[in-house]
Image (cartoon, rainbow, N blue to C red):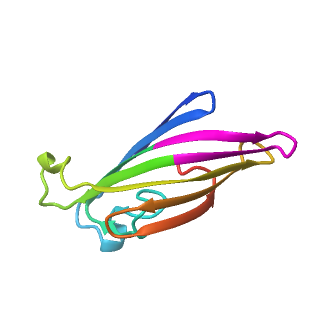
Amino acid sequence: MTVCSVWQLDDLTFAGRIGSEWVAGDAPFWMLPILGGEETMRGFHLRRFRDQAMVHYSLALRKWLVSLPFLNMRLGLQAFTDNGRVFGNGDSFSDLLKNHHRTAGGGLLISAFTSDFIIRADYAVSEETGRMYINIGFVY
């Protein structure tokens, strides 16, 4: 389950999301919830963390800086942080707020042709590595 929320003030946008997933029983390894990659934890390799349950949360601040109406384009920046962790069967509820992995990053935003078409280039850093992502649309 994932919940997203976006607050906008002129060209400044605050966006946040929180998500969790839990698998009951004796699920095969490949069906366990994962963290890592562009969708959950930018700055970590895709599927870096995997276990019976996971929780992740992200915050972003986006700002449109330049508008080029004759080209129907806007240029902007974003800063973000992604956080989360996985849980095994031996973890208790008191461990919920412990040992979270964190990433931070930022990137360039380009809106072209229409305000709904966003090209995004992000760079995120974790305690393990840095990762570059180029994609269309926002993650959340």
Q: Position of residue 129 (x, y in %)?
A: 38, 70
Specify whether 75 is left or right of 53: right
Q: Quadrant of residue 69?
A: top right
Q: Residue furthest front?
A: 66
Rendered residue at 46%/55% (across/down): 105
Residue sitting nearer the eye, 17 or 133: 133
Q: Position of residue 76 (x, y in %)?
A: 64, 45
**Can you see residue 75?**
yes
Q: With respect to residue 41, does 138 lie above or below?
A: above
Main SS, magenta residues: strand
Residue sitting nearer the eye, 140 or 91: 140
Q: Which residues are magenta?
A: 60-78
**Magenta includes 21?**
no
Residue sitting nearer the eye, 109 or 58: 109
Q: With respect to residue 135, does 12 lie above or below?
A: above
Q: Position of residue 34 (x, y in %)?
A: 36, 63
Q: Quadrant of residue 65?
A: top right
Rendered residue at 57%/33% (across/down): 12
Count the marks: 0
Specify whether 64 is left or right of 38: right
**Magenta includes 72?**
yes
Rendered residue at 15%/47% (across/down): 93
Q: Quadrant of residue 50?
A: bottom left
Q: With respect to residue 39, does 117 lie above or below?
A: above
Q: With respect to residue 33, does 137 lie above or below?
A: above
Q: Residue furthest top?
A: 9
Residue sitting nearer the eye, 64 or 82: 64
Q: Residue furthest right?
A: 70
Q: Position of residue 108 (x, y in %)?
A: 61, 53
